[in-house]
Structures are given as C-alpha cells and as structure tokens.
Image (tube, rainbow, N blue to C red):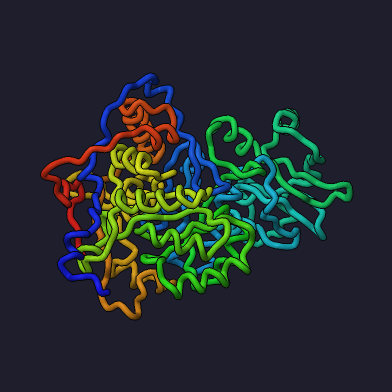
Amino acid sequence: MVQGFSSKIVEAARAYSFQDLLLLPGLSKVEPSEVNLASAASRRIGLNIPFISSPMDTVTESEMAIALARLGALGVIHRNCSAEEELDMVKRVKRSESFIIRDVVTIGPERTVGEAYEAMERNAINGLPVVDNGKIVGIITGRDVRFADPGLPVAKAMSKSPVVAREPLDPVQAVDLMREHKIEKLPIVDADGKLTGLITYKDVHSREQFKSSTRDSEGRLVVGAAVSPFDIERAKELSKHADLLVLDVAHYHNARAIASTKEMVKKIEDVDVIFGNIGTKQAALDIASAFDNVGGFRVGMGGGSVCTTTELTKAGSPTAFATAQVADAVSELGLDSKVIADGGIRGAGDIALSLALGADAVMMGYVFAGCKESPGETTSVEGRMYKLHRGMGSASAREKRMALDRYSQPTKGIPEGTEAWVPYKGEVASVVGELTAALMAAMGYAGAASLQELKETAVIALTTGGSHTRPSDMVFRFS
C-alpha cells in the first residue's frame, strides 16, 4: 500500500539542527581541566583532540595538516587538485616530522647546486643527503646552496664524509651524537653503507615540544586524504602514504558510488576508509552491509556555512540529526566504526552537542578557514584581515575542480555552494586552544569526564523559537 501523502507530513522525522538543541547541566564531579578529550577518527587512528579539518581547498593543505597533527588533531588534504599535487601534500606531512625519516629526499653528486636548491624548495626542507649508487657520500644544506654557483656540481659544494649512525638508535643517543658533532642531520645507514633513513634535530625536538601530537607507529605525523570513489588510481597511490582515506562525495548513499568503492577497496593498501557524506540511519546500515571493517562515517548534508544544497534543493540532513541517526546504526550493529560530524559547526557548543549525540570527532571548515595555516586568499576590509572560504560546490571551486564528481557536475547545472570572507583568526594553535578550553567547560557543565561518558550521560533539551539562521561574522557571501 502506498503511503498517504498527508501521512508523509504527520509521520515526518524531526530533523533537529544545532540551534534547536541545548546540553543540559548535570551533576559534575570533575573540573574542566580534568576532562579527557581523547577519541578517534577511525577504527585505527586515534586522536588526542576530536577535531578534523575539512578537505576544502581554502582549509586544508599540508601546512594546516601538520599544525593540527602536532596539536593532537587531524587534517584531511583536499582533492581539488591533480593527483600528483595531493600526493605531494600528503608526503610533505609525512616527511615533516619523524624520529627516522624513511622516505628521504636525496640528490646525486653529479646534479647541480641549482637543482638541489629547487628540490629543497619543492619539499620544504633545508638539506639533502647526497647518494651515489645507494651509498651516502655527502650532505648539502641550504647554507651550502645559498653561497654557491647554481651551475656547480653538488659534489663540489657538499660536505663530505658525513657523520652517520646505525640502527638501533633511540632519540637520546641521536641527540647526543648530533650535539657532539654539531650537526642537525644524522643519516642512518646499513652495514653496507647504504642510506636507510635520516634523523633531524628539528624532528627530535618537535617530538618533545608536541607531546600530544597525532603520530603513526614510526613517529610520523598522521594525515588523511580526500578521494573520489570513482578515482581508483588516485586512491591507490594515496593509500600508500596517507593514514586514512576520506570518501568525498556530497551524497554517498548512491548505488554507483558504493559499487565503485567496492572495486576501490580491493586495490588500495590496508588503510581505514571514511564513508560519506551520509545523513540517515538507513545509509549507514546499507554501507555496513556492503563493506567489512568500515573505518568510519562522515555525516551531515547541507549544513555547512558555505553549502547551499539544502537552500537550493530542500534536500539535506542537519548535522545534529544525521549524527544521532548514524550513531544509532553503529550502536545497533555493534560496529567499531567511528562517526564524524561534519557541517555547520561554529563553536565548542556545537562540538559538545555533536559528541553527546554520538560523534567521535567533528569535521570543521569554517572554524579553520580563517587561520594562518589555511591556504585561502587573504584580504583587508576596513582595516580588518579576512580570508576567503568557499564551498566545494561553489562556482569558483567547480571551475578549478580537477575531480568533477563530488557534485556530479556535469549532470547538475547549478552550483551548490557559495563563497565568503571570514575573519582572520591567527595561528590554528590559538583557535584549537580556545575550542578545547570551551569544550572542556561544556563537558564540565554536563558532568562528563570523558567523551564516552558524555555520550552515555548527556541530557539534551529542545529550545523554543529556534531559527535556522544565526548571526554571521562573515563580511559578505557571494555566489
């Protein structure tokens, strides 16, 4: 029997958004400073702070991903570029810090000083081991190339007979050796003198400075990468270097997307995959039945500050509602998959609500778009600094787009996003510090000492007279 049209209204689900809800205060036995914010981005990727930056081209490139991983959070590199450019950004994060760098950028002794300089600039590093037939024969640094003829062979400008070390080696031993010889780079070689890795003083010092950073088993910073379910070759290459892949589709609950992902997971490395975006419990159930070991779900549709999908189409799922829906599915199935709330999160209150409704982490674009580390364009308006933030369905993003399928452009003739100038906020460390302090305060009000406790004990109330818009500190939005 076909459902009656009037019953569609009477029995309609109530899709509450953040401004419709409040986190009620509860009996607190913990001070905000004692709250533990540890969580996870996926089944195997832990976080010390439950924040993830959105894979948008005005939000997350390597600089943002490095900064967030150092703080204990996670950055997901956008895919609005060539596969080679995205892979290069991922590699830059992985090379940025490690006790022993395995993917070492090297140069041959016959190459020129100018080529060495270009390699250092391209990879944002300040020195290169000089390797001949696999064996290290010297080191060339930024200081060496700055004062040498660009056409000079590297062999003439490098420091010869470099100090090297063999494994096993711990950080204390490495630092002692570098201090003894007054060097900042320590090549690691095997018994045959072949280069197997590199230790830098900067990396060892950074591990001490950022003790809560998000790192892999080799001590490298963790990074995610956005992929299309239809771009299998890109996913194959990225899976060799990124710690997790984030499927980047506006509406993932789609038969073609699911079928293509089945082919993808057969060909990629063993990394966690985040499925999304989705907005309903049924979507999560269908995905869980189609795939083993789902790393996580990215949930929320149409709620972003620069997303106009719901405004244009009346199709969407507010992030608060979508989070609760998908968290219910994960709980009922007993999955270890994580839930990432994505879209419309403007501050710690929205973060606290998301976590209370079952999210393990939140993904934010607007919050991070105004930071120094975001790649967005900067401008000055009446003496104040602003950065450009645009939705990935906006006209300009679609014009640049290398991977056209997130918003199915060529079948959709309208942009589903807009652009805005958002206030410049300074370094992301300051923004994260303010958010974590406010989130810990919110959890203190709710009486929760951990995120799991917040999920289990938080009480949510409905507000009255809620509006689906709220004041914005954007200068202006434009299509």
The furthest residue to the front: 1
Toward which corner of the image does residue 393 lie, by quadrant?
bottom left
Q: Position of residue 238 (x, y in %)?
A: 57, 62
Question: Looking at this view, is 241 or 381 the one in front?
Answer: 241
Q: Residue furthest right?
A: 192
Q: Is residue 285 visible?
A: yes
For the C terminus, the quadrant is bottom left
x, y percent for residue 202: 60, 37
Residue 37 in picture, x, y percent from top left: 45, 33
Q: Is residue 297 left or right of residue 130?
A: left
Which residue is found at the position 55% from the left and 31% from the top? 211
Q: Nearer the viewer, residue 77 or 315?
A: 315
Count every numbered label the image shows and give the total. Answer: 0
35 displayed left or right of 178: left
For the N terminus, the quadrant is: bottom left
Q: Residue furthest bottom?
A: 411
**Image: 127 above or below 112:** above
Q: Is residue 226 visible?
A: no
Residue at horizontal 24%, vertical 50%? 16
The picture places residue 328, in percent across and down from the top left corner, at 40, 49
Q: Residue at x 31, y 40 (%)?
A: 353
